[in-house]
Image (spheres, rainbow, N blue to C red):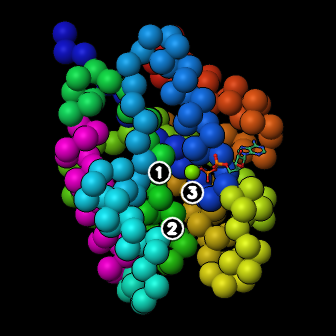
Amino acid sequence: MQKKGYFITFEGIDGCGKTTQLENAYKMLTEQGIECVKTREPGSLEIGSKIREILLNYNGEVSDNCEMFLFLADRSQHIDTYIKPKLKEGIVVLCDRHTDSTLAYQGYGRQRDVEQLKELNKIATNNIIPDLTILIDINVEEGQKRAGKNPDRLEKSGKEFFERTREGYIALAKQYPERIKIVNGEKSKESVYNDVKSLIMELLKL
Ligand SMILES: Nc1ncnc2c1ncn2[C@@H]1O[C@H](COP(=O)(O)OP(=O)(O)O)[C@@H](O)[C@H]1O
Ligand SMILES: [Mg+2]
């Protein structure tokens, strides 16, 4: 029988605890002797790091479409040249942000057509869908505080934008209840990790 890796994504607004919990999951799986890798979007590959640089550091104007296609271009390369081969080898792939970030931020946050973005995601991913998406939910103020963001940022990007993004994630979890599981990110790190661990153990039948 062909070994099959599991594809697990971590989602949620800035500061919710994605990176913290992904590291915990990686450590736990590695200690159990399960082969796994950690990766992120955008910008895990060399081409991606260049794209990430534009998205995060470019000071000029980036149009909404340009932003969207850059994220999708990065994802496409990431899936084809990294994630897919790992899954084929039976390796568990832990990914910090993926398709649902596009839907939550560009779709719900920037109020683009979510259904159209779903179709574009399908092209970018070659229809590879995560086996499990852990959505860490946290209120916007707490997330920004934890992420060390200047409070002005909330004003600048519009608090409504971040609220819509958070609500968008929750809407997605309702649309895909089998795949997206919500974890309350406002609890302690240990407590959040217990929930994360249970979800992963259940998926991997450990
Ligand atoms: N449950 C938690 N309670 C308090 N602080 C947390 C919790 N989870 C993460 N943090 C802290 O909040 C900050 C942001 O966490 P991080 O994992 O980097 O979030 P993200 O990757 O989602 O932006 C880090 O300093 C981290 O140590
Ligand atoms: Mg992070």
Q: Nearer the viewer, mark 3 or mark 2?
A: 2
Amino acid under label 3?
Tyr
Q: Please, which residue is most extreme toward the bottom here?
A: 61
Quickly name the residue at label 2.
105
CB at disc 1 and ligand 2 closer than 8 Å:
yes
Of labels 2 and 1, earlier in sequence is 1
CB at disc 3 and ligand 1 closer than 8 Å:
no
Instruction: Tell me, yes or no, whether the two marked residues, 3 and 1, touch with CB atoms within 8 Å.
Output: no
Q: Is residue 37 magenta?
A: no
Numbered disc 2: secondary structure = helix
Give the extent of the magenta segment: 65-84
Return the x and y of residue 154 as percentages of the image width and height.
71, 77
Quickly name the residue at label 3.
169
Of labels 3 and 2, earlier in sequence is 2
Near mark 2 (Cα within 10 A), the count class, few <14, some 14-19 or many ≥20, is many
C-alpha distance separating marks 3 and 1? 12 Å
CB at disc 2 and ligand 1 closer than 8 Å:
no
Residue at the image position 57 percent from the left and 44 percent from the top: 19
Q: Is residue 119 above or below residue 193?
A: below
Q: Is residue 76 magenta?
A: yes
Image quadrant assignment for residue 112 = bottom left
Amino acid under label 1?
Arg
